[in-house]
Image (tube, grey):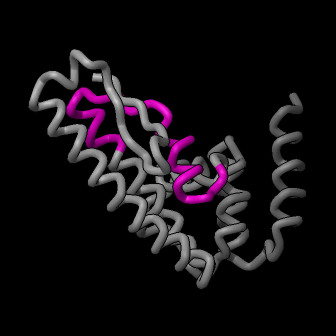
Amino acid sequence: MIVTAKKILNQTNFSADLADIMDPKNYIELVNMQKRYRELLALINDDLAQLKKTGEPSYAYKIGKLIFEFKENYRQKGIEIRGLRNQMREDLKVSRSRLGYFMTFYKLYRQDSIDDSLSWGYYQELINISNAEIRNKIYNLIKQGKITSIDQIRSLKKELTQAKKRP
């Protein structure tokens, strides 16, 4: 079943083809999905407030995990949710790219490897480094205290990326 997230009368709803909705099992699943989505938004809003208050990246990780698990839960049931990120952007008043950072952060890092003494901004810069070897090298330099600013991260990223391209 393909489900589309969209705003109807100031509330996010999920819709599907009429043939799918006519099946009582699918209809109940759709109603439950809407309830779980509202619960998801409440949890994410709490974590967004904590992230803003503390700057601790573990809240960004939790947000990415919540979104990923919501989508994955339905994917495993054979339900594809279209337009979810765009709708979440609108419902949470958060940019689409920021939601992407949260999800990528969850995919790239293990929860036990996140250091809340580093700012979320540092992790965002690391997420932007597609080469895992370079990303890990810079992360280790940050942890050793050899890199102390986002500008240093960007400069070293550029330098290492160019060096990788040279024969």
Instruction: Name the quarter where the N terminus is drawn.
Output: top left
Q: Is residue 43 above or below residue 56?
A: above
Q: Is residue 79 magenta?
A: yes
Counting the numbered discs, the total is: 0
| Residue situated in front as seen by the camera: 115 or 87 | 87
Q: What secondary structure prevails in the magenta region?
A: helix
Q: Residue at x 57, y 77 (%)?
A: 56
| Residue situated in front as seen by the camera: 156 or 94 | 94
Q: Give the farthest residue toward the front.
A: 9
Instruction: Name the quarter where the C terminus is drawn.
Output: top right
**Horizontal and vertical percent position of residue 27:** 18, 33
| Left/right of residue 164 with respect to residue 68 in the rendered view | right
**Horizontal and vertical percent position of residue 68:** 40, 48
Q: Is residue 90 magenta?
A: yes
Q: Is residue 36 above or below residue 143?
A: above
| Residue situated in front as seen by the camera: 25 or 158 | 25
Q: Residue at x 10, y 31 (%)?
A: 25
Q: Residue at x 68, y 59 (%)?
A: 124
| Residue situated in front as seen by the camera: 115 or 44 | 44
- In the image, the segment drawn in magenta is 71-95
**Horizontal and vertical percent position of residue 149:** 83, 73
Q: Residue at x 48, y 63 (%)?
A: 61
Q: Give the farthest residue toward the left.
A: 24
| Left/right of residue 115 with respect to residue 161 in the rendered view | left
**Horizontal and vertical percent position of residue 102:** 55, 55
